[in-house]
Image (cartoon, grey):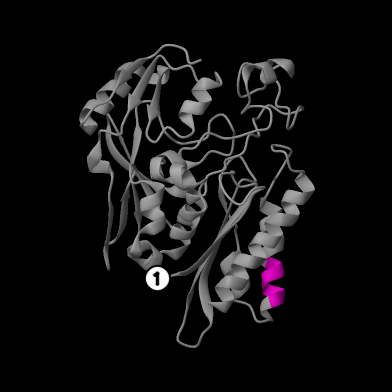
Amino acid sequence: MMAPFEYHRPRHLEDALQILARNGRQIKILAGGTDLVISMKQGLFEPEVVLDVKGLRDLAFIRYQPGAGLSIGALATITQVATSDVLIRHFPVLAQAAATVSGPNLRNMGTVGGNLCLDTRCYWYNQSYSWRVSCGFCLKKDGTVCHVAPGGKLCWAVYSGDLAPALMTLRAELKIAGPRGERRVLIESFYVNEGRAKFDLRPDEILTEVFVPPASADCFGSYQKFRIRGSVDYPLAGVAVVAKKGPDGRIHDVRAALTAVNPAPQLVPGVNSVFGQQGAHADLMEEVVRLALRSARPLKTSASTMEYRRHMLAVMLRRALSALLGG
């Protein structure tokens, strides 16, 4: 059962920002509700106010102009992204990532903004109240110890969204609106590598739009996702890779990003420089795998073991790179 709350559904962004400004940290934003509503039923969130932004229809769009870039409103659905002919043709890694999110019904409800602002997840956190009380709660909710890393002071609940790593490889920016006006941040700067803090988003701000620069259009791309079941489940490891190919067939501008193996999605540093070297593709791929495993910290945050998730991260990355090189 949910705790009682005050409900608002404005039709204009200015009204939504005023409600946010009045209620500060006592408010939660509801878009598709595919994650928030479940968490409220579990008692993980007990907001005094719920701000339903589905009435802000001006934020539900996908626009692309060659030379001007791609803009996606925060309320565009995951299904719209997965099935957009423009994205499938010009930004395939993003369409692929969207197509792996949950199942069809939840993709129809879930939004781009909601997926990017997904709460971090953990074996000890995303559970019923009786489960959480039996282990003494955790650092992220009501407790003082992170059961993933008991000796530390940071929360290691992992970020498990699929769109963020794809957008990182595309050099996306996020537009954020607040009482002080609008600001833009690179998507990799938006995420905080700590399971409680999560995002660079103030309580009175709202994510409104995603922008992908025109230079990122028409990249070859691949998104590979490891999960226990073939649908519905969150990733236990996810990899996005993009590159461009020159007239001679050589690839360049290679970028790779990871999800579900850290409290934040992360770009893998040094990938493009690896492919600037001479050598067989198999050797270059293994060097990229080593770089990725150096960045990833898949600790005990799910039903799978740390070792198996590291192994599958390498498998997913090899598959993504093979698809890229073969494309």
Query: Residue at 58% of width from left, 76% of height from top?
Result: 325
Compared with 57, 273 (above or below) is: below
In the image, is 144 to the left or to the right of 118? right
Residue 184 in view: yes
Q: Closest to the observer: 139 or 98? A: 98
SS state under label 1 = loop
Q: Position of residue 42 (x, y in %)?
A: 56, 21
**Quadrant of residue 86 in the image?**
bottom left
Residue of label 1 = 218
Question: What segment is highlighted magenta in the picture?
Answer: 282-287
Main secondary structure type of the part rendered in magenta: helix
Residue beneath the point at 44% across and 64% down: 92
Q: Position of residue 323 (x, y in %)?
A: 58, 71
Q: Residue furthest bottom?
A: 248
In the displayed structure, does residue 88 sit left or right of residue 266? left
Q: Is residue 201 above or below residue 169?
A: above
Number of numbered discs = 1
Q: What's the residue at 50%, 41% (across, down)?
A: 191
Q: Looking at the image, which residue sits at the far front?
A: 105
Q: Amino acid at mark 1?
A: Asp
